Image (tube, grey):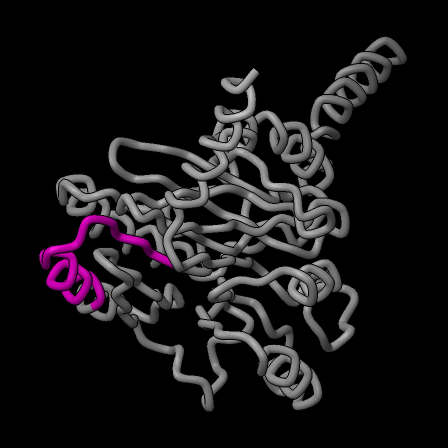
């Protein structure tokens, strides 16, 4: 009986002591539904942050819909005034001049390197400069590397991972080609978090993949049904523990629930419908050919 009492107690204490002081919430596409234009963050995120504590919030781009809308910007700053937050620029908010988030920045938490990356690249020259900066910093004595971006720079096409848009993805893919080999050979655990999915019902809203020493994560809001963020915990053991968290229910979910394979199964039928809608005229070709064939035959028989 005592064993039955002390075992759960031991497990609870073990879990409690294994976590360190730092817990981060990563959110993608925080302004939410592109068609709503309500001048505020997605309501699921607002409700969640009002009742849940995090040491830091990292906005993974597109937290502002219109950078010329002073009311929207004022609402964002007012709501976040009570939080410790970091901004990663997306294609919607890259031009916010008064916020210092345009360049690649580095932060150290214990033995972990956090890289806040602006993937709205303008040229190959800029990419090479950023890659060199990252390489120089990673070569220092860190155990874990955490990279935060808006674009899923490792997504090569909509058939790989369908993102909210494909703006600037050619340069993003070039960046990936320049840095990925180095990251895999770094002998460090690498975690990449991106926020350019989930804005629409037909786009994946949570994503996870593991390749050698690199783990990829992505989330995004706006689809109205599946509102996920990523909770990042820095353990006292030096490890990084991640889980997806449902902003509506606060339920934590294993990252394997949104594996690469499951995401492909989710997006494939939606991609198929999209291709049918956007290329419907190709479906007319066989019908036109059959019509031409029978018309020609009919005219021949008539003559």
Can you name the residue that lies furthest to the top here?
301
Towards the viewer: 195 or 51: 51
Instruction: Based on the picture, tell me whether residue 261 belongs to the magenta stretch.
Output: no
Residue 228 lies, in percent from the top left, at: 62, 48
Towards the viewer: 121 or 230: 230
Residue 302 lies, in percent from the top left, at: 89, 13
**Quadrant for the C terminus in the image:** top right
Q: Is residue 125 left or right of residue 140?
A: right
Q: Is residue 37 left or right of residue 128?
A: right
Towards the viewer: 258 or 68: 258
The magenta-colored residue range is 130-148
Can you name the residue that lies furthest to the front here?
2
Residue 174 lies, in percent from the top left, at: 28, 53
Question: Which residue occupies 35% across, 39% down?
Answer: 215
Which picture quadrant has residue 80?
A: bottom right
- Is residue 127 placed above or below 199 in the rendered structure? below
Question: Which residue occupies 46% across, 60% down?
Answer: 150
- Is residue 6 placed above or below 126 in the rendered structure? above
**Quadrant for the N terminus in the image:** top right
Please state the total of marks drawn on the protein image.
0
Question: Which residue occupies 55% across, 58% down?
Answer: 28
Which picture quadrant has residue 267?
A: top right
Residue 140 lies, in percent from the top left, at: 10, 59
């Amino acid at each position: 009986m005592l064993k039955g009492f002390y075992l759960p107690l031991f497990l609870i204490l073990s879990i409690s002591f294994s976590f360190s002081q730092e817990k981060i919430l990563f959110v993608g596409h925080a302004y939410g539904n592109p068609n709503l234009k309500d001048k505020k963050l997605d309501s699921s995120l607002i409700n969640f942050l009002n009742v849940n504590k995090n040491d830091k919030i990292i906005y993974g781009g597109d937290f502002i819909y219109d950078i010329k809308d002073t009311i929207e910007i004022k609402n964002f700053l007012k709501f976040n005034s009570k939080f410790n937050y970091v901004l990663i620029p997306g294609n919607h908010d890259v031009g916010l001049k008064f916020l210092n988030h345009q360049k690649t920045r580095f932060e150290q938490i214990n033995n972990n390197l956090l890289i806040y990356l602006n993937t709205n690249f303008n040229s190959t020259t800029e990419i090479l400069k950023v890659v060199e900066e990252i390489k120089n910093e990673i070569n220092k004595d860190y155990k874990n590397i955490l990279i935060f971006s808006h674009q899923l720079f490792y997504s090569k096409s909509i058939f790989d991972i369908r993102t909210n848009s494909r703006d600037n993805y050619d340069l993003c893919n070039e960046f990936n080609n320049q840095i990925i080999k180095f990251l895999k050979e770094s002998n460090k655990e690498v975690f990449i978090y991106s926020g350019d999915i989930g804005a629409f019902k037909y786009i994946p809203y949570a994503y996870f993949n593991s390749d050698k020493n690199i783990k990829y994560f992505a989330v995004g809001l706006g689809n109205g049904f599946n509102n996920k963020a990523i909770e990042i915990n820095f353990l006292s053991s030096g490890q990084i523990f991640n889980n997806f968290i449902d902003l509506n229910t606060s339920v934590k979910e294993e990252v394997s629930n949104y594996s690469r394979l499951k995401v492909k199964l989710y997006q494939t039928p939606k991609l198929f419908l999209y291709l049918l809608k956007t290329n419907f005229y190709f479906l007319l070709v066989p019908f036109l050919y059959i019509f031409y064939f029978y018309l020609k035959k009919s005219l021949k028989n008539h003559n």
